Amino acid sequence: MLTIEAIGQGRPILYLHGWGFDSQIWHRQVDFFRSGYRNCVVDYNLRDLPPEITYDTLLDHLCTLILERWDDPGTPPYSVFASGFGAFLAYELIERGVRPACLVLFGGPVRFTNDERYLSGLPPHQVSAMRRRLHQHPRAMLGDYYRLAFSGDGERAPQDLLAAPPTHALEFLKLAFDTLITHDFQELLPDLAVRSLIVQGDSDRLTPVWQAQLLRRLIGDAELWLCRGGGHLPFVTRYAHLNRRISRFLDDAGGKAPPAVMPAR
């Protein structure tokens, strides 16, 4: 079941986690921002998916659940923090009419195929192998994924993440993986009209820098901040300096963004 946990008081920040993780991935940001913001942390590693949900309808299904569970229908999130798969969900929410003042993307992909039909820089045979391994040996595949995610300079996967990977939500992980490798948001992104900060590790082996550069060009009103030596999840491994950088961006956005609105459910 999708849940939204609210922590702190103030303008709401909506957190959308990436594939292979759950809401605990954000605790370093929640601890930092809880004194000035209401941190609305979504967990959508669903154990019980309706049988009719497919990879083509998964994003729409999750958007509907988030809007149904949002506790203040008249007030949209001030900002959306999104990583990986969560970025796809953020794009869909904005297309539905959710108008945050600003958007913070951590390795937010545009598409997972480039002109050479590579998945995020990985050759097709490796993508196929990852998908097979996910179906046959999910815990081992998640271990491989975590090693890639934390492959920046001097990075190691935190033990709290390694101890309890979300294999309880295997069917969700399968659908979400297929969603990632089949969706392309290039045509949608120029219409987002949301001031954005893109945070990208320059040693990311899952979402290469060219995607962040493409993302900045497509959104238009976007800043790109490269974390030197950072891997796929710099908000976990380099959070202290990064949180302060994001805080300045949120403060700046407060005086420049148009009035935010929330769509009717």
Image: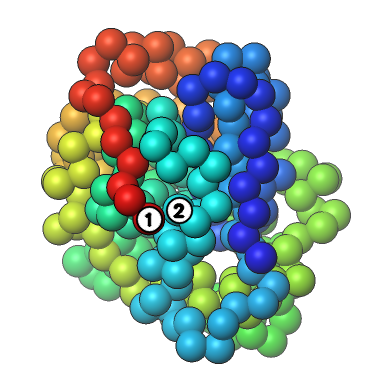
Tell me the mark number nearer the camera, choosing from 2 and 1: 1
Residue under pointer 2 = 67
Question: Are circles 2 and 1 on residues that touch, CB within 8 Å?
Answer: yes
Q: Amino acid at mark 1?
A: Arg
Could you tell me which secondary element the residue under label 2 belongs to?
helix
Q: What label does residue 265 carry, if any?
A: 1
- Residue drawn at point x = 19 percent, y = 55 percent: 188
Q: Residues within 10 Å of mark 1 (few under 14, many from 20)?
A: few
Decide if residue 207 is in sight here: no
- Residue drawn at point x = 82 percent, y = 45 percent: 160
Q: What label does residue 23 carry, if any?
A: none
Of 126 and 24, which appears nearest the observer? 24
The C terminus lies in quadrant = bottom left
Residue 245: % across, % down: 47, 16
State the image quarter where residue 39 is shown: top right
- Residue drawn at point x = 75 percent, y = 60 percent: 165
The N terminus lies in quadrant = bottom right
Q: Amino acid at mark 2?
A: Leu
Of 178 and 195, which appears nearest the observer? 195
Of 23 and 116, which appears nearest the observer? 23
Sequence-first tag of 2 and 1: 2
